[in-house]
Image: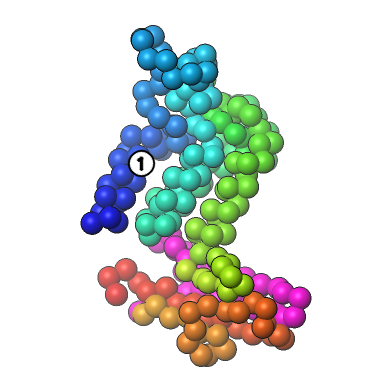
Amino acid sequence: ERDGRAKQALRSALNSLFDREAGIVKLFDPPFDDGPAKPGYIKGYLPGVRENGGQYTHAAVWLALACFGLKEAEEGYEVMKALLPENHPTEIYKAEPYVLAGDVYSHPDHLGRGGWSWYTGAAGWFYQTAVGGLLGLRVKDGQLYVDPALPKDWPGWSARWETDGGSLFIRVRRGRMKAVLLDGTPVESVDLADLRGEHGLEVTVAEEGE
């Protein structure tokens, strides 16, 4: 029931806030304009500019993270791609095409225009979402867990994880049944402190319906 409510909230957020055509995720909608509501400083911005109903990229990345956490990989991947400057025309975006903007306007006269750029918080969260949500790499108490959320057109991925004592080659692929094998032995996680020499971690993500 809890996951059901979470997925309902996620679906509502995607339907109400993710403008797929413009490639932006609004912080809320509609923005504050004329009226008695006093939400604070954000009403000082034009409707659809910065935090007043524009895209606040921190929050947009969290929406993608929520998608991955609920195994809605395709939606999470679509949100992440929409946030990248390379997927916005430079003449509209008007910010550096190689920097994640902290906000993007939803105002009709400036739809898709980037605001604060070189905003390390948004970029940092994007990185964490890519590594922890999409690729599913998580370290807890010295243990490495791999639980990916693969978009439908991804057959898998591979990476090398280096430690002071060893190296772990990780290979993720699709299959009939979920499995995590360290050098052929089933495991739940990998103890990074005890990693010595070269090892292989094979992670199989079960196909939908399995």
Q: Is 182 situated above or below 82?
A: below
Closer to the camera in the image, 155 or 107: 107
Q: Quadrant of the C terminus?
A: bottom left
Point out residue 193 in the picture as x, y percentages from the top left corner: 67, 78
Label 1, on which residue?
A: 14
Segment colored magenta: 148-176
Residue at the image point whose x is 50% and y is 59% from the top = 134
Is residue 149 magenta-colored? Answer: yes
- Quarter of the rendering containing residue 53: top left
Residue at the image point whose x is 42% and y is 73% from the top = 205
Point out residue 208 in the picture as x, y percentages from the top left corner: 32, 68
Residue at the image point whose x is 43% and y is 81% from the top = 179
Residue at the image point whose x is 37% and y is 27% from the top = 29
Closer to the camera in the image, 125 or 135: 125
- Quarter of the rendering containing residue 22: top left
Is residue 40 in sight in this rendering?
yes
Closer to the camera in the image, 39 or 20: 39
Is residue 106 in sight in this rendering?
no
- Quarter of the rendering containing residue 25: top left
Point out residue 137 in the picture as x, y percentages from the top left corner: 55, 66
Q: Residue furthest front?
A: 141
Point out residue 102 in the picture as x, y percentages from the top left corner: 60, 34
Check disc 1 and give the amino acid type: Leu
| Element carrying mark 1 | helix
Image side of residue 17 versus residue 131, left or right: left
Q: Residue furthest left?
A: 1
Image side of residue 196 versus residue 183, left or right: right
Classify 10 Å Cα crowding around label 1: few (below 14), some (14-19), many (20 and above).
many
Labels in figure, total: 1
Is residue 59 magenta-colored? Answer: no
